[in-house]
Amino acid sequence: MGQLFYKSKPVIGLDVSLTGIKVMSIDAAQLHVLGYGSVDLDPAAIQKSLDNPDDTYLSDNIASLLKDHIIGNLGSNYAVIGVPTGRTFSRTFTLPAKESAHVKSALEIEVEQYIPIPMSSLYVDYQIIEHTKDTLTIAMTAVPKVLVDACTKAAENANLVPVMVVPSIDAVARVLELTEQGNLSTLIIDVGPATTDIAVLEGGAIRVTGSVGIGGNTFTLDIANKLDITLESAHQFKVINGLTLSPRQAKITHALKPSLERIISESKKVIRYYNERLNQERKIEQVLIVGGGSNVPGLGDYFTNALVMPARVASPWQQLNFGKLKEPSKQFRPRYISVAGLASVAREEVLS
């Protein structure tokens, strides 16, 4: 079936987060956007829907998005679905090469030791990403079955055909590989509206992930509470002044510091795992900050100083050609990085 539909139809990306849904269709050969759209969600309602495949909130909103909120033309109903990274588990581990026949047993042990959900309640996939004469390096991803089932059922109820499900951070990594020196060992910090996902990308694979419940909306609330101003004014201070030199710099930095330090702390945990368990010789070479909550001036410098390695806010959008379509506003453009990665999945990956 896959080979037949690919002759006439591309895949589309469908990104499901705790604050919204995004969809995009891309001509991957030219990175030309054919169509896209998004809708915001109620966090409590989507959380309930993701925990219950029979709840219709997610499918109703996917249907509404496809019917009323598309700019351009998607041209397909075959969907690669991105699910919230914070509800998934990605780890990399090594085995002696002589144990290659026992990878599945090793996966079970890894799940038992490091994942707080029983194997029977997870979909687990893996890939051997390095194979030397002495060792195997295995990248494992585990996702709760209820989450995958809820997303695929909702997509099917909205007349989409799910062909792949991946953590959204994998889709982000795909775009950064294409546009931002993704050949380097990279720490990705994806600041969404409500959560920040952190991952190490090396050799085309996500090696380890982490997540913290802090995002761009948290930053706005921090500023509003500390400076005793409205949310609208706090948002303006965040995106115009941020952490850069200004009369308000000290107050804004003081307001954001507790949340930023939580992100820094989780980043250091991810780095430590990578350095100690995976790669004692090769160090992380760059930090790329992405996502809708990354629009804080001075954020790159802050992370550079805190992590003592070069960090910058990545801007892969110059590679995407929207043609005659109305582009997302500059403020909202970073929201689409994960769905762009989903939409650019190669047919070989779906068919493998």
Image: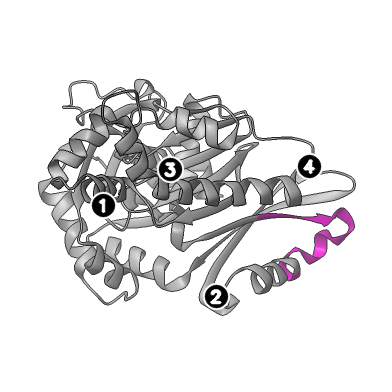
* Label 2 crowd (10 A; few <14 / some 14-19 / many >=20): few
The tag earlier along the polypeptide, 4 or 2, is: 2
- Residue 87 found in image quarter: bottom left
Is residue 247 rendered to the left or right of residue 123?
left
Magenta highlight on residue 97:
yes
Give the labeled residue for mark 1: 21
Q: Is residue 133 visible?
A: yes
The tag earlier along the polypeptide, 4 or 1, is: 1
Vertical order, 24 against 61 (above or below): above
Identify the secondary structure beneath mark 1: strand
Which amino acid is tagged 4? Gln
Between 111 and 154, the one nearer to me in the picture: 111
Residue 332 percent location from the top left of the image: 24, 36
Vertical order, 124 against 194 (above or below): below
Tag shown at residue 117: 2
Give the labeled residue for mark 4: 280
Nearer the camera: disc 2 or disc 3: 3
Alpha carbon separation for disc pair 4 and 1: 39 Å
Give the labeled residue for mark 3: 190
Alpha carbon separation for disc pair 2 and 3: 24 Å
Alpha carbon separation for disc pair 1 and 2: 26 Å
Residue in the image at 19% along x and 52% along y: 40
Q: Mostly what secondary structure, the magenta segment? A: helix
The tag earlier along the polypeptide, 1 or 2, is: 1
* Label 4 crowd (10 A; few <14 / some 14-19 / many >=20): few
Which amino acid is tagged 2? Ile
Which amino acid is tagged 1? Ile
The tag earlier along the polypeptide, 2 or 3, is: 2
Residue 186 percent location from the top left of the image: 58, 35
Nearer the camera: disc 1 or disc 2: 2
Alpha carbon separation for disc pair 4 and 2: 29 Å
Q: Which residues are magenta?
A: 92-105
